[in-house]
Amino acid sequence: MLYRHFGIFSIERRKAISPTTRSCSLVFLPEKIMSRILSLLLVSLIVLAFLCGCSERDETTTNSGSTLKADTALKSAEQNLKSAGVPISFDDPSQLAKPEELMPDLKILGTVEKQKNLQSAITQLNIVLSELDQEAKLAPPTIGSVSDLAMVHFYLGLAYVLDAISRLLISDDPNTTFIIEYDPKISTDAWFKFDISKEVKAKLDATKNPLEYPIAFTAQERQALIDAVDLVNDAAVRPTDKNIQPQSSSVNGPPYVNSALWHFEKALDFFAQYDPDLQEGLEEFNIQIDKFESMLQQDSEKWGFTYTSSPGR
């Protein structure tokens, strides 16, 4: 499992201690005896050097299925997710039994600092994923490697969703435009709530031409909506009216390689091979992310945008 393969070990390099020599007089020893003594000393030095070299190499190795680069990236990703408010521990896979509890208070995500934490986490988790994929090509997949891949895909999906929410909340500063709430304990079937402020609704009501609805949002708010939809579902959102300033996604390149829904689906596939019980717990969470994505689509189209889903969805 991940906590076995991704041990973040401190590396303490040992310095080989040079053997000290004691002065002694070998002048009067027979030549054969002197030769044997020198040979033994030489062999001892070679053995000592070999053992020191092996010790140094052993200290830099990692567990099977991982690499030093992956371990380092994982440690950085964990710290960035914690800084963004995610109560994460890669040493505790049981957290995924209740994935809804891994969501932070969404209000704290409305800062540039938190958004940078999430972007950095995505960058580092992509490095981990790349390293694991390379290792998997070198050896047949094991239970541990499958669970590692499942967890990395899940947390990548989570980071994408939180990044999308963060961008929406940042875009409307200082006035509130987008209202996003999350409560997995409410009685309704949707954990997320997505809406806009009364002020923006008033602007939409005052706009006679529905094609001009996107103008009720600032360029920054439109950009946040475009990016959020791309992050969650790899979909394209554009104003229907071509006379409105054209804007395209700013998250269609590295480190944003796929989408939240894509990573969640991959996580489910891997957990099906590793732990069906965890898979069952994650399915409801994925359903809720799907519902959140549907809200983004329906509202985008209602506000005068076209919504084009990615192929295969």
Image (cartoon, rainbow, N blue to C red):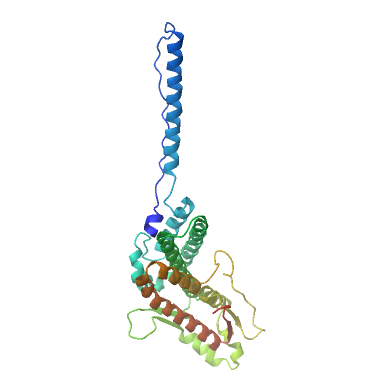
> Which quadrant of the structure image shows residue 4?
bottom left
Q: Is residue 210 visible?
A: yes
> The N terminus is located in which quarter?
bottom left
Please name whichever residue, 45 or 102, is drawn nearer the observer in this view of the structure. 45
Q: Is residue 269 left or right of residue 225?
A: left
Q: Residue at x 48, y 86 (%)?
A: 199
Nearer-the-camera pick, 212 or 153: 153
- Quarter holding the C terminus is bottom right
Q: Residue at x 40, y 55 (%)?
A: 5
Q: Residue furthest right?
A: 243
The mark total stands at 0
Furthest residue toward top: 28
Residue 147 x %, y %: 41, 63
Residue 74 image point, x, y percent = 44, 57
Q: Quadrant of residue 224?
A: bottom right
Residue at image x 47%, y 52%?
A: 67
Residue most extreme to the bottom: 208
| Image spot of residue 290 (x, y percent) | 46, 80
Instruction: Decide if residue 80 is on the left or right side of residue 256.
Output: left
Q: As rendered, which of 72 and 153 lies closer to the eye?
A: 153
Residue 38, position as x, y percentages in the image? 45, 17
Residue 104 in sight: no
